[in-house]
Image (cartoon, rainbow, N blue to C red):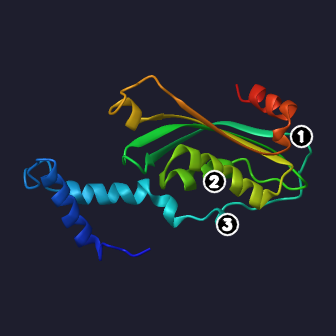
């Protein structure tokens, strides 16, 4: 992908233009350092582009079991690629090992990597599930993401109490009994 911004200073100039576009004076006291603050915040908000699941998903055979492992309530913050507005919520992850497990903190780190990129909730959900399938090769994986989207709450349809729920189901979780057990464990 071609980089349309040659450097940091070029990016700052574009942000100044955007401030002017919305009708602001980029030289007024409260805004003079805003382009730099935005670029610093973007470094953190979009840090997922600098991270790779390969670096965090180490599998272990010691301690592997045949029972479901579920982690619920992993909090995340992301940015909608359609409107450049935040969305946030929780991720519940379950998997049934196939001779290998990962550390309990690793699913949260995986969520962090994928959520710190421009996203849509549907892709975020499948990326998490597919990465776990690729690295763990488990019997099954299920991921449920629940989120509030500023693009739905403060613009457009203006539904502040709405929550979007998406799921990705792989392997034995296609079976209703496994899916029901996961949902019971994560309620």
Q: Earlier in the sequence, mark 1 or mark 3?
A: 3
Q: Is residue 42 above or below residue 82?
A: below
Q: Earlier in the sequence, mark 2 or mark 1?
A: 1
Residue 179 quadrant: top right
Residue 46 quadrant: bottom left
Between label 3 and label 2, give the one nearer the viewer: 2
Q: Is residue 136 above or below residue 74?
A: below
Q: Quadrant of the C terminus?
A: top right
Q: Position of residue 135 (x, y in %)?
A: 76, 61
Q: Check contact, mark 1 vs mark 3: CB within 8 A.
A: no
- Rounded to the nearest angstrom, the CA distance separating label 1 from label 3 is 25 Å
Q: Quadrant of the N terminus?
A: bottom left
Q: Secondary structure at mark 1?
A: loop
Q: Secondary structure at mark 3?
A: helix
Q: Position of residue 11 (x, y in %)?
A: 26, 67
Q: At 69% across and 57% down in the image, what residue appears?
A: 131
Q: Is residue 10 above or below residue 17?
A: below
Label 2 crowding class (10 Å Cα cut-off): few <14, some 14-19, many 20+? some
- Relative side of 47 to 74, left or right: left
Q: Which residue is mark 1?
A: 67
- Relative side of 132 to 64, left or right: left
The numbered dot on residue 148 is none
The numbered dot on residue 127 is 2
Q: Which residue is mark 3?
A: 54
Label 1 crowding class (10 Å Cα cut-off): few <14, some 14-19, many 20+? few
Q: At 15% across and 53% down in the image, what residue appears?
A: 21
Q: Check contact, mark 3 vs mark 2: CB within 8 A.
A: no
Q: Residue furthest front?
A: 157
């Amino acid at each position: 992908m071609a980089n349309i911004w040659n450097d940091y200073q070029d990016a700052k100039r574009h942000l100044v233009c955007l401030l002017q576009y919305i009708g602001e004076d980029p030289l007024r006291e409260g805004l003079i350092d805003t382009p730099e603050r935005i670029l610093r915040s973007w470094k953190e908000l979009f840090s997922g582009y600098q991270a790779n699941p390969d670096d965090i998903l180490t599998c272990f055979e010691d301690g592997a079991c045949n029972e479901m492992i579920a982690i619920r309530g992993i909090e995340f913050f992301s940015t909608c690629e359609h409107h450049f507005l935040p969305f946030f919520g929780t991720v519940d992850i379950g998997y049934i090992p196939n001779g290998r497990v990962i550390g309990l903190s690793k699913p949260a780190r995986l969520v962090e990597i994928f959520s710190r990129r421009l996203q849509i909730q549907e892709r975020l959900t499948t990326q998490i599930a597919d990465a776990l399938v690729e690295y763990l090769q488990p019997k099954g994986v299920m991921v449920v993401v629940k989120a509030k989207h500023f693009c739905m709450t403060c613009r457009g349809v203006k539904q502040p109490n709405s929550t979007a729920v998406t799921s990705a189901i792989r392997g034995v979780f296609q079976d209703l009994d496994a899916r029901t057990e996961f949902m019971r464990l994560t309620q």
